[in-house]
Amino acid sequence: MEKKNSNRKGKGNGCALYKKCGGCQLQNMTYEEQLSYKQATCIKTLGRFGFVEEIIGMKNPYHYRNKVQAAFGMTRGGKIISGVYQSSSHNIVLVDSCMTEDETADKIIVDIRKMLPSFKLFPYNEDTGKGFLRHVLVKRGFSTNQVMVVLVTGSALFPKKNEFLKKLLSLHSEITTVVQNINGSKTSLVLGEREIVLYGEGYIEDVLCSKRFRISPKSFYQINPTQTEVLYKTAVDFAGLSGKETVLDAYCGIGTIGLVAAENAGQVIGVELNADAVADAKINARLNKTKNIRFFCADAGKFMVEAAKENEKIDVVFMDPPRAGSDLNFLRSLVTLGPEKVVYISCNIETQARDLLYLCKNGYKVKKIQGVDMFPHTKHIETVVLLSQRRPDTHIDIKFDLSELDITAAETKATYQEIKDYVLDKHGLKVSSLYISQVKAKCGIIERECYNKGEGKSRVPQCPKEKENAIMDALKHFRMI
Ligand code: SAH
C-alpha cells in the first residue's frame, strides 16, 4: 500500500498516487487542457451573467503551494508514515513529494518523519490517546524565504524537545520559527486552540504586491502567492479606485486585499471572523505604514446588517467569502448599502453564481468576469467578478416570484461533490454519496430512490456520527437545512 509519489509531471505520466490521494483531479490533462476545461466551466456557470475573459494560467504550474500539511500515522507493521488521507477513509497514504507542494516543505516533513524513531516519538493515536505527533504544517514565505513549522501534538508534553529542535534546525537552517500546536480532542480539525512558540517569533512574513504581511499558524493566507498577485491586481483594477472612495474588504483574512487597495482609496474597512487573522491584519497595517485602514473582528453578515442600519456610505465592496459563499444577511445589507461597485472574488463558482443571481435581481449588473488559475492540476477555480449599480436610466424592472429570493431555493443546492469537498476541506473527512443521502433523508430532504440502498441480505453501512455531524455542517453551510 505504501507507494511513493514519484512526482512526475505532465499528461499520461501523472502521479502514482492519483487515485488514492485524489488531490489533483485534472492531472491526466496537459496544463493547456486544464485551462481550457476551467474556462469552459467558468463559461457554463458564469457565462449567463456576461462575457468571461480568458483564464490567467501560470508560467510554471508546479510546486506552487506555500502551505503543506501532512497527517502522521503508523502502518500495521509499525512503520511511521506521513501524508494525506486516502479517499473515503482515515488511512494515510505516504507522500514524500508532490508536484503542487513547496519542495522545501516536503523535505522538512520527510525529515521530521525520519527523526521520530531516534527520539522515541510516535504518531498520536486518536483512539488510545497515546503517542505524540498528529500533523505537521509547514508555511513558507516565497518572497522572504521565512519558514514556519507547526508540530501538532496530542498533548503539551514534548519529551526531548530541545534535542529534537536542535536536530531539526541543523537539518533545515532555513526554518525561522517552530510552533507546537496542541490538539488533544477527537476531531478531524487539524489545529487545536493552544500554541507554544518553540523557536523564533511564532509567525512568518511574506511580501505580496510590494506589501509585507505577517502570517500566523491559524490565519488564512492564499496558498499560491504567484497567482495571488495576479488575482489581487485584477480585483483592484476592476474597482478602478480614484483615491477618494470608502472601501470595504469583507472576509479580509490578514487584510491583504484591503492593504493593497488602501493606496488608491480614501479609507478602507476590513471585516473578518477569525480573531488571529484580524490581529495579523492590524499588525500588517502598521508594518506597511498604512493609516487609512481599520479592521473589525465580526461575522461579515452581521457587520453588514449593522452598517446598513447606521446608513454607512460605502463606495466599493471587495468580498472574498469562503467556499460556501456569502449569506443572505450579507447580501441583503449589501443591496441596502448600495455601493457603486462590488468586486466578488470566489473560490467556488457555484455559490458565486447563486450570490450573483441575487445581486443581479437587486439592482446590480455584472461588468467583468475573470478566472485566475490558483490551483493547477486540481479542479478548483478562482474567479473575480465586477458588479456595478444599474443606473436608473438603464434600469430594467424584472418581475420575479419572491420565493426565488429565498436562498434555500433549488438553484442554490450544493451537489454531492460540493458537499464532499466541503466536508474534506473543513473537517478533513471523506464521505460517500450514500452517507450524504442518509443524512439528507434524516434532515427531511427528499431524495430519489437512490444510492445503493443495498439488496437482499447485504447490510448497508450507516453513516458514523462524526461524519453525520460534518455532513450536517455542510448542509447548513449550503443552506439546505
Ligand atoms: N481575502 C482574504 C481571505 C479570503 S478566505 C485573502 O485573500 O487572503 C475567506 C476568509 O473569510 C477567511 O479568512 C475566513 O476566516 C473568513 N470568514 C469565514 N466566514 C466568515 C464570516 N462569516 N464573516 C467574516 N469572515 C469570515
Image (cartoon, rainbow, N blue to C red):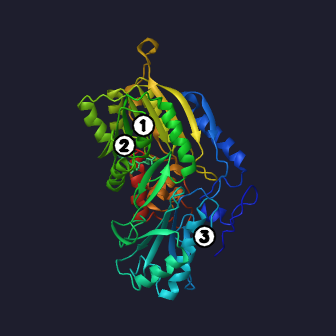
Q: Is residue 328 above or below residue 23?
A: above
Nearest the viewer among 181 and 27 is 181
Type of the residue with mark 3: Val
Label 1 SS: loop
Which three-letter amino acid code belongs to the residue tagged 2?
Answer: Thr
Numbered disc 2: secondary structure:
loop
The mark tally for this picture is 3
- Are the residues at dot 2 and dot 3 in contact (C-beta closer than 8 Å)? no
Q: Which residue is mark 2?
A: 290
Residue 57 in the image: x percent, y percent? 64, 44
The CA span between labels 2 and 1 is: 8 Å
Quarter of the image where one finds residue 391: top left
Amino acid type at mark 1 = Glu
Q: Which residue is mark 1?
A: 263
* Mark 1 → mark 3, Cα distance in angstroms: 42 Å
- Say the numbered circle drawn on residue 447: none
- Which callout, 1 or 3, points to the residue nearer the camera? 1
Q: Is residue 93 above or below residue 368?
A: below
Q: Residue at x 49, y 69 (%)?
A: 175
Q: Is residue 1 visible?
A: no
Q: Do the residues under discs 2 and 1 have CB atoms within 8 angstroms?
A: yes
Above or below residue 310? Residue 251 is below
Residues packed near mark 3 inside 10 Å, few (<14), some (14 to 19) or many (20 plus) = many
Q: Residues within 10 Å of mark 2 (few under 14, many from 20)?
A: some
